[in-house]
Amino acid sequence: MISTFAYELSYWQQTVLRVVGGLVAVLLPAGSFVYLYLFKMMSFMQSRLGPMEAGPYGSLQLLAEVGKFAQKEDLIPERADRMVFKLAPYVVLVSTFLMVIVLPAGPDMLMSNFDVGIYLALAVSSISVIGILMAGWSSANKYSLLGSLRATGQLIAYELPLVLAVVGVVIQAETLNLQGIVFAQAEGDIFGWGGIGNPFIFTQFIGFALFMVAIQAELTQPPFDMPVAESELVTGYLTEYSGMRFLMFFIGEFATAGVFSAMAAVLFLGGWYVPGIDPNSDWFNLLGPAVLFGKMMLVSFFIFWFRISYPRLREDQLQRLAWKVLIPIALVNIVATAVLKVVF
Amino acid sequence: MAMPGMIKGLGVTMKTMVRTITQGADTVQYPNVKEEPTPRARGVIALHEENCTSCMLCARECPDWCIYIEGHKYLAPPRREGGKPRQKNALDRFDIDYSLCMYCGICVEVCPFEALFWTPEYEYSEPKIADLLHDKAKLGQWMETVPDFEDYEAGSEAKKLTVPK
Amino acid sequence: MDPTQSQQLAYIAGQAADARVNVELETDEGMVLNLGPQHPATHGTLRIVAKLDGELVIKAEPIMGYMHRGYEKLTEVRTYPQVTALINRIDWLGNFANEVPFILAAERLMDVEAPPRAQHIRTILFELSRISNIALFLGDMAVQLGAVTPVFLAFRDREHVLNQIEAVTGGRFHPNFDRIGGIKDDLPAGWIEETHAVMVKMRKFCDEIEDLVLGNEIFQARTRGIGVIPADVGLEYGLSGANIRASGVDWDLRRDNPVGLAWDKVDWKVWTHPDGDSFARYWVRLQETREATKIVDQLLDTMPAGPIMAKVPRIIKVPAGEAYIATENPLGEMGYYLVSQGELTPFRVKIRSASFSNMSIAPWVLQGTYVPDVVTILASLYFILGDIDR
């Protein structure tokens, strides 16, 4: 973008642009998910209308909620470990922001063209486990402790299907670079027909299914929300958090949902590419973010649909599902992909 | 790996969502839209003062003792010339405290002179609890909102009463 | 003793009772977790003190009484119409069903029988209360398990039933409609037609719940084999209602203990399930709701004409005597033991509430389960705090 529009931006200007871009990339999905899916779609599925008062059709409800949270008292339990308690939300947010670095939104719209992009993204996403453990343990509350211990077990268990599902894509794209994966889908063909490129969802449908299940578990959404089991543990590891700190966890959860959905769109649905336009053209620098946003909304529609419809699995059933069902399927998928890659 | 049960569950939520978007929700946006309760709904009690003789039955039977009645006797002129003056009750004070009332309806039921009636009005909340004590004048105003008694179903032998206007 | 001294002693006694529970549990191995009086999982202020080993429950003890309102003492100083108005609030979701056993006990002592139309309407309202109560259970157990949607569907469809109850009695939750000798008022015109339509909606709701919750594999994984109560253990602990029918015992007071209401005039079936687990309890209640809609439909079609009130004196004074009447309430078996000495007020009313006996099995069934299963089992036993504590 910088060289295209014949603009020479200095380093600090680029940095500002990157920071703003990162914030937008994190907060915009969070806000739109919260409004569109949590407030509205959930309400429609429950035969009611959701918030309608704040702004037209309740669109400013999230701002009202932010205002409400901002003016709340900052409570820290007496026996809580103060520094760890305060640090925990930031640790969870850091992992989300770091994942955005490697997410491509256009041929040149990315913060860093990392050659091991997907590896970095997956590695960084597991930092949130530490944040959740810190939150639960430092709260001096038995419910929070139970919640965070469950979360640790669950998140670590579901890291493996997440990573293994992606290995199939990497084999097919022959690169770990996320931009390279998008180009591989854009310039590939299905049995010789290059009309819509080669979105990996057609060949990697098992990987896609595994990835979706693993995202649902990584985000601790129902049916995998044992850590935040509202009817047992009040709010699990978040019980003692109120006001702005809770808002940070809340926004972090939805921002992570956005980033993971965008990752799924990049890996399986073709990222910022739409068929018909040359992938190297500059139009994609303007069109790409919008396309990626649209695909992200599509993927997260399914995440929230499952969240609204299903009860939750018990902890040992979760673990059994991950270790005994999902990982063997993922391994079989890798072997099949490797064999078929060599054959075709 | 077919999971038909889970897919059917997704179908139910999707169907509900489509129905809410196309046909509207099952909730109404109060206070822009107000639903009408049924005519027999127990909203608030109205007093028809002409019928009341201060017999105190309602105040005695109320489980919460939320009705306060004060009356005095006075001598009314005789009906005919040269007759005895008649002793009658006059109602000084008839208050119902709605902060205590549990809307059981015993007072309306035991009144032998049909002076108390139910109305489905429910929007009378006040910022101060003391304002929930409705005095004689306010209870008389509620009489305007009393609906007529409904007809009964076929096969009923109950007689329909009329509301005095 | 002056009041302050007796108050002090009562306070110390309460602390000592609390301490017994705490000390007893703290001295053994394991972590004590209070699924305390304020908790989203318990239907009200119930406290379960559980001793955990990780997530396994070693011992669990329910502590009831946080919502005790002194009903049995209250009835000693209230006249019969006032008692009828009060006892609506014991099981606040099964609205009309609370009044019926008490009124029937008083009628038995007075040797009065309500006319057939009154019995018919009583049965219809009883079954409507059952439908509204169990519909809430169907949504509520799903929400305890994590599915947030069914409870909204349950509330949405329950509104229709409550509107019908309101159209007859004037009150959605506390009808106060039963009187000694009959019922208070007759049905308004058009009610039978509307109630038929509402029953169609409730059957559709049952089908939706079956698709959304019962058929869901996750729900089945969470409830099958959880909290198995064998039939003999259940009978020993005094379980009643759908809980015992889900363990295979074919016992329904509507059929086995006729008290004069109109159940023997319609064709209906008692549902049982051979497993005794939480899934069976949910399943039995779902079928019972469907059966109740069919009962109401048949009753509406065969409504006899006639008066709704027998000849009773204006001021009710029940003759001296004792009577116990129990009926199949939505929660289980509810009975009133009425002792009268010929006064305006009862002398003593003992309320046998279903949930109190259902909760007594909690220590036995919660042992050796996981914390999530505790919630599942308590939700499937379905108690209402007002019914436990009175």
Image (spheres, grey):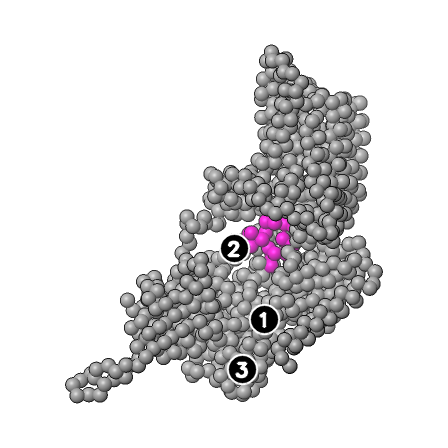
Residue C76 appears in view: yes
In the rendered structure, does residue C143 fall within the stretch colored magenta?
A: yes
Q: In this rendering, which labeled residue sits more in front, label 2 or label 1? A: 1
* Disc 1 target residue: C69
Element type at mark 3: loop
Q: Which residues are magenta?
A: C137-155
What whole-number distance in Å separates the C-alpha atoms at marks 2 and 1? 31 Å
Q: Residues within 10 Å of mark 2 (few under 14, many from 20)?
A: many
- Looking at marks 1 and 3 on the same chain, the residue that comes earlier in the sequence is marked by 1
Marks 3 and 2 share the same chain? yes
Say which of A130 and C340 sits in front: A130
Q: Are marks 3 and 2 in contact (CB under 8 Å)?
A: no
Please report the residue visible at 35 percent of the width from the left and 73 percent of the height from the top. Answer: B93
Q: Position of residue C218 (x, y in %)?
A: 69, 49
- Which numbered circle lies on residue C157? 2
* Disc 3 target residue: C346
Q: Residue furthest right?
A: C29
- Looking at marks 2 and 1 on the same chain, the residue that comes earlier in the sequence is marked by 1
Q: Residue furthest top?
A: A6
